[in-house]
Image: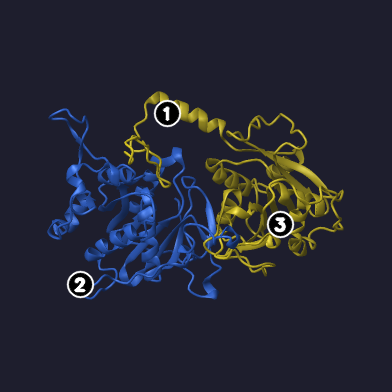
Chain colours: A yellow, B blue
Amino acid sequence: MATFFGEVLSVYSRAVEEDDDDLDDENEDEQIHREIEEKREVHIAWCPEVAQSLEDSGSNKLQCSDLIIAVGTNAAGFLSAYVLNTESWDAVGHVSLWNERSRGSSRQSIALLPGEPACLFYRHRDNPAVLVCQSTCYIAEDQLFQWTEKVFGCLQKRGLSVMVLSDSPVAEYKTPDYLYGSAVPFLRSLKSSASESQALCPALEQPNILTGLPAAVLSHCQVHQIPAVLYQCYTDVISPDSITMETYKPALLCLSKLVKGQPCCPVLNPR
Amino acid sequence: MMFVAAECTPTSFKDFTLIMPAISVGNVGQLAVDLIVSTLNMCRVGYIHTDCLIPMAGNNPYATFAENANDLSTNAEVYSSPELRLAVLQIRTPVVQTKSKKFCKLMVSWIKASGFSRTVVLSSSHAYQRDDQQLLGTPLRYLQTPSMQKVTGDRLKEMEWKEMETVSTFPGVTDSEQRLYIPGGGATKGLFTDSCAEDIPLVVVLIFCSEGDNIPDAFTLLNHLNTWLHLVDAPAQTQPKWRIPASWRLLFGSGIPPALF
């Protein structure tokens, strides 16, 4: 469109991409699309023990009573410091995927470097029906549904209960009153209709929404009537931060009945 | 099958009218659908669970009191009003870029399998792409599939609705073939052409608009639709009253820090 001074600007829409009315693909394009789709596939690699359990189960599903998923470095850090800090957890698997921001190889033989963004599964040694997942790698929009279907596809639905801890920048929190610094970080919760648990913090008010992996997991639980509760921590710090991690402490009330480890104070960069 | 019922009892949509939005410029179709669900107090009966849409979750966008405020909502849900024999699909997130074709096919096959007597797609198109003729008169247009033509006959023409014009495939070349062109309409054209191919009675109602505050466009589109479907009664010479849902708060951001001034 032309502007007041005569230069031509391209108009963009927040809703639609341009050139999407030309949907005719050549055969070559189809092959390229197929190859890209294969490259972007989500793969779950389980340790031999768990892979064997899956095979032995007959339905190719693990019995799981509690699945705890941490999305983001602070949520993952909270679990590392307060839950996974005892000797009772075994690393049992990881998800590998490739996208523009997560260049992890989709070949399962490459070992993960420590500190690398990743998606790891841990299982409690004394209570193998409890699984923890720490997800710190970026999962693209087109991979979220696949991640969720593949992970939940390995778990028996009956008796399953899910908890999600998720980091979010406070800049994305919409509120009519300006949020002063002292109010941040804070927790908000969401739960699926099948969940009967008491929320330990206020519910996420409209018009705020969840996106990304937390949204994909909660939507899956809602549609499949799996009890699920999510705690979203809004923080103004991007990097791992002990005060942000401590904000998740109310979730320990639900987790402490699953784990016997004593929560200890993490030694991290003070604010 | 991507429709998942919310309750255990199966829902039948046989002979219902379906209203659904296209994700299009200004999100006008989606805003209009929000107004319909909110005003008619429609009940959620199911979800569209598919890898074609970007995931999203949040609390009940149509909450009217504390008790129903905490029902979780997902990115694509189906609402129903059995008394009006009306079903409404709301889609809240964009279609994943590479899955547009698949999405159209899935939607068309769901519509066919559900037995809707007619489907209305609410959509919009870039106002800046209008030609000289389109700049004059009403910004509202419609399109109907041949199967829909059999159901409604000339009703829409008699109501003086304007059919969406086609464009020349090769502009400037005389006797060039005409084709359908809906810039900014998202999956509208795909849904329409697939519905023609599958003999589905479907009508597209769209408005020319630009990005911005598109609430007035949603009202215009919906009032126009109401003159045909009479979803809400309106006394003569007045516009119907639509209820704005709670989720429309803060559309343009949070409160401003007082220290800024």
Do discs 2 and 3 belong to a common subunit?
no
Q: In the visual, does B142 lie left or right of B80? A: left
Q: How many marks?
A: 3
Residue B4 in percent (x, y) is at: 47, 57
Q: Around disc 3, counting alpha carbons within 10 Å, would you say few (fewer than 14), some (14 to 19), or many (20 or more)?
A: some
Kindly identify which chain the residue marked by label 1 belongs to. Answer: A
Q: Distance between the residues labelled 1 and 2?
A: 54 Å
Residue B162 in percent (x, y) is at: 18, 52
Q: Distance between the residues labelled 2 and 3?
A: 59 Å
Tell me the residue that label 2 is attached to: B237
Tell me the residue that label 1 is attached to: A30
| Kind of residue at disc 2 | Gln
Q: How far apart are marks 3 and 1 (CA)?
A: 41 Å
| Kind of residue at disc 1 | Glu
Do discs 3 and 1 belong to a common subunit?
yes
The tag earlier along the polypeptide, 3 or 1, is: 1
Look at the numbered disc 1 and give the secondary structure of its residue: helix
| Residue occupying the point 61% across, 66% down | A203
| Residue occupying the point 51% across, 30% down | A36
Q: Nearer the viewer, residue B145 or B134?
A: B134
Q: Nearer the viewer, residue B79 or B27?
A: B27
Q: In the visual, does B2 lie left or right of B220? A: right
Residue A64 visible:
no
Residue B182 in percent (x, y) is at: 29, 43
